[in-house]
Amino acid sequence: MQKRPIALVTGTSSGFGMHASVALVKAGFQVIASMRDLTKRDPLDKFASLHIAHDHMEIISLDVTNPDQIHEAISSIIERHGRIDLLLNNAGYACGGFVEEVSSEEWRKQFDVNVFGLIDVTRAVLPYMRQQKSGRIINVSSISGRFGFPGLSPYAASKHAVEGFSESLRLEMLPFRVQVVLVEPGSFRTAIWEKGIQEQELDEASPYASQMKQLMHHVESIMEKAPAPDEVISTIVHAATTRKPRFRYPVGKGVALTIAAKNLLPWTWIERLVTKRS
């Protein structure tokens, strides 16, 4: 009986990571679903029990900002399975706010999770993929990795960093037959908004108060009206299983149009369009 390819997924307690873990099992992978806090595993356990056989998924503790945990997790996977065929870097969160008002601590935390955590997990996996001369790394980016929306500067900056890192990494790893892919979702209904931007307190005395109100209204609208993440999950599965994946997969209503507009329109036009909506 042919063994299932091994997939490591980060950030699986909710959202894209939880749904992608189950979808990848359905697609034929043996999934190691990791999360920072195992006390939050119940939603994944319940969702998985409805859709897949439990023996095709393992759940492990992994804080992507902890180098010792990363080393231990990767070593354990290699020891038990002998290889890692797919890495889905999904762990991350959204820090909202305006540049002047976001503390240095918040900026560093945003980059520690979204950028340095992703890089450290990737670097731990690369030697094994390089030696086996096969593998695939899917980095979950965002439309915010292509367009810096106001009020999302920490998140947008972190996702722009992921985009640049992924471009270089893809070119470095092609000679070793390791493929790097970016999935760039727009607005979907996931806990990232509830956990991040919604927790920001509105200061009526702030010079950015009116803009923050607009941002919070937009977040509430996403939580109410944005679609479920099905399209993102099917894109991840396609990127994981197709023989020759593209480098970038923009996903969601208006995402491709936004990217095209930024690439084709004069920047002054972009500024007018965005400030009119603010």
Image: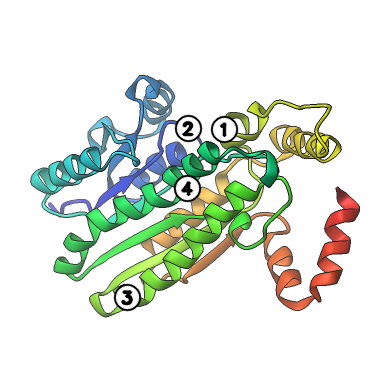
Which numbered dot is residue 41? none
Instruction: Name the residue that disc number 1 marks.
Output: 191
Which one is nearer the viewer's eye here, 12 or 53? 12
Q: Is residue 136 above or below residue 62?
A: below
Which one is nearer the viewer's eye here, 185 or 170? 170
Mark 3: few, some, or many residues within 10 Å (few <14, many ≥20)?
A: some
Q: Horizontal and vertical percent for residue 194?
A: 62, 30
Horizontal side of 187 relative to 11 (left or right) equals right
Contact flag, marks 1 and 2 (Cβ < 8 Å): yes
First in sequence: mark 1 vs mark 3: 3
Mark 1: few, some, or many residues within 10 Å (few <14, many ≥20)?
A: some
What residue lies at 47% left-to-right and 71% top-to-bottom?
246
Label 1, secondary structure: give it: helix
Q: Horizontal and vertical percent for residue 160?
A: 55, 60
Rendered image quadrant of residue 165: bottom left
Which one is nearer the viewer's eye here, 229 or 148? 148
Q: Horizontal and vertical percent for residue 93?
A: 52, 39
Instruction: Name the residue that disc number 3 marks.
Output: 172
